[in-house]
């Protein structure tokens, strides 16, 4: 496990004045992150091991609306079958403070890695595409829409990518009720066109965000550029995405995901099948097992970049020896996949658009 100079896992910040020391039966060790609604702490499980514990900010504990949103996040997180997502361990209340305990995922955010080091290698970009698509399948199968898929919510664990943060996820059947008129929930640049015009979030909205995210991971640039939110909004609504730098293995799927009309985008499961087929896997009966096998072959740990905590990789030399054969297999597999994809690209896109219709 990578650790910072303080001996804590990389990426963990110290507790601040006002932070609790214990919540429920968990000893808090440091801060993993903060958001508008809550704080995520690194905590020690009473039976050993590390977990991530999320709880609302102290100033929000008396806000009934935000407490209801937190309770909804807990309920939705429990509905998702954990695969390429963080598994829920426990939830509870400590002296009127609700909390949610999840699997601790050691690894930097995709946003940190790309900003610091540029685009991912083709094999890692393909792994992120597979893992995040698999996570969306799990989310959508649970009847939910994530609504905030972005590079900051994708952690690159030693085993593969993991999608986190269901803070603004919504039930597909009730999403229109929860979204107020004129209110767009999500992060600028990662919101689908139909939501920018006031429409509800649908599973296809997450697929659009997937397309933006994979283009960003593979090229180092957002497919609609940079700028103020209103500039990005206009480009997302009116301009075609810039995906020329996306590897050929991924480009057709990314282009299909970035269709302006949600009805023309593939479903997450169809997207995942097309990605596996493009990689030479075929049409497996068990998608999760297939994704797990591919990630086991092509994925290698991604260290925290400079500035995200001083990192020392434990057993660096043996790890290099273990990952080098996987890198060689990944490069060979990518070369073969590109060749096979050239023959089936038009078929894949046609299948994706037909499935979406």
Image (cartoon, rainbow, N blue to C red):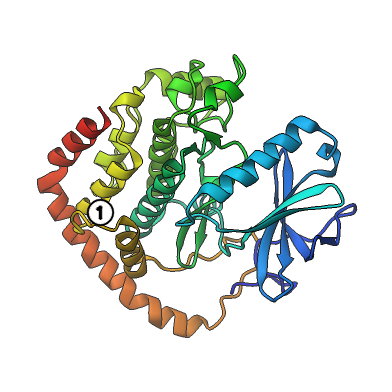
Residue 318: x percent and y percent? 45, 85
Q: Is residue 119 left or right of residue 244?
A: right
Residue drawn at point x = 53 percent, y = 22 percent: 176
Is 13 situated above or below 239?
A: below
- Quarter of the figure that contains the N terminus: bottom right
Residue drawn at point x = 58 percent, y = 65 percent: 106
Query: According to the image, label 1 marks what residue?
Result: 276
The reply to whether residue 235 is in sight is: no
Is 260 situated above or below 161?
A: above
Residue drawn at point x = 66 percent, y = 61 percent: 11
- Quarter of the figure that contains the C terminus: top left
Residue 100: x percent and y percent? 69, 53
Residue 149: x percent and y percent? 50, 40
Residue drawn at point x = 30 percent, y = 48 percent: 272
Q: Is residue 261 left or right of residue 200?
A: left
Query: Pointer 1: residues within 10 angstroms few (<14), some, or many (20+)?
Result: many
Q: Quadrant of residue 45?
A: bottom right
Is 190 situated above or below 307?
A: above
- As rendered, which of 270 and 195 lies closer to the eye? 270
Q: Quadrant of residue 38?
A: top right
Q: Secondary structure at mark 1?
A: helix
Q: Is residue 306 left or right of residue 24?
A: left
For this orientation, the residue located farthest to the right is 17
For this orientation, the residue located farthest to the left is 343
Q: Is residue 86 left or right of residue 263?
A: right
The reply to whether residue 98 is in sight is: yes
């Amino acid at each position: 496990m990578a650790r910072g100079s303080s001996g804590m896992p990389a990426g963990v910040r110290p507790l601040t004045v006002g932070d609790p020391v214990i919540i429920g039966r968990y000893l808090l060790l440091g801060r993993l992150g903060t958001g508008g609604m809550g704080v995520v702490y690194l905590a020690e499980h009473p039976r050993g091991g590390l977990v991530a514990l999320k709880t609302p900010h102290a100033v929000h504990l008396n806000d009934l609306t935000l407490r209801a949103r937190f309770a909804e996040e807990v309920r939705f997180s429990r509905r998702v079958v954990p695969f390429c997502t963080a598994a829920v361990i426990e939830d509870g209340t400590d002296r009127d403070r609700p909390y949610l305990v999840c699997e601790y995922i050691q690894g930097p955010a995709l946003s940190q890695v790309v900003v610091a080091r540029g685009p991912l290698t083709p094999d890692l970009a393909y792994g992120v595409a597979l893992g995040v698509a698999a996570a969306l399948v799990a989310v959508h199968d649970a009847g939910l829409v994530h609504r905030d898929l972005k590079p900051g919510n994708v952690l690159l664990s030693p085993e593969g990518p993991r999608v986190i943060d269901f803070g603004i996820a919504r039930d597909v059947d009730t999403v229109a009720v929860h979204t107020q008129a004129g209110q767009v929930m999500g992060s600028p640049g990662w919101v689908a066109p139909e939501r920018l015009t006031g429409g509800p979030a649908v599973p296809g909205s997450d697929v659009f965000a997937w397309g933006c995210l994979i283009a960003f991971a593979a090229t180092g640039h957002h497919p609609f550029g940079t700028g103020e939110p209103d500039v990005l909004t206009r480009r997302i609504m009116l301009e075609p995405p810039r995906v020329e730098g996306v590897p050929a293995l991924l480009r057709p799927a990314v282009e299909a995901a970035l269709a302006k009309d949600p009805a023309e985008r593939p479903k997450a499961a169809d997207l995942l099948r097309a990605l596996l087929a493009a990689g030479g896997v075929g049409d497996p009966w068990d998608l999760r097992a297939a994704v797990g096998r591919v990630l086991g072959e092509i994925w290698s740990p991604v260290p925290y970049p400079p500035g995200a905590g001083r990192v020392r990789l434990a057993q660096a030399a043996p790890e290099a020896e273990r990952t080098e054969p996987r890198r060689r297999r990944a490069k060979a597999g990518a070369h073969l996949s590109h060749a096979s994809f050239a023959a089936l690209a038009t078929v894949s896109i046609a299948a994706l658009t037909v499935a979406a219709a």
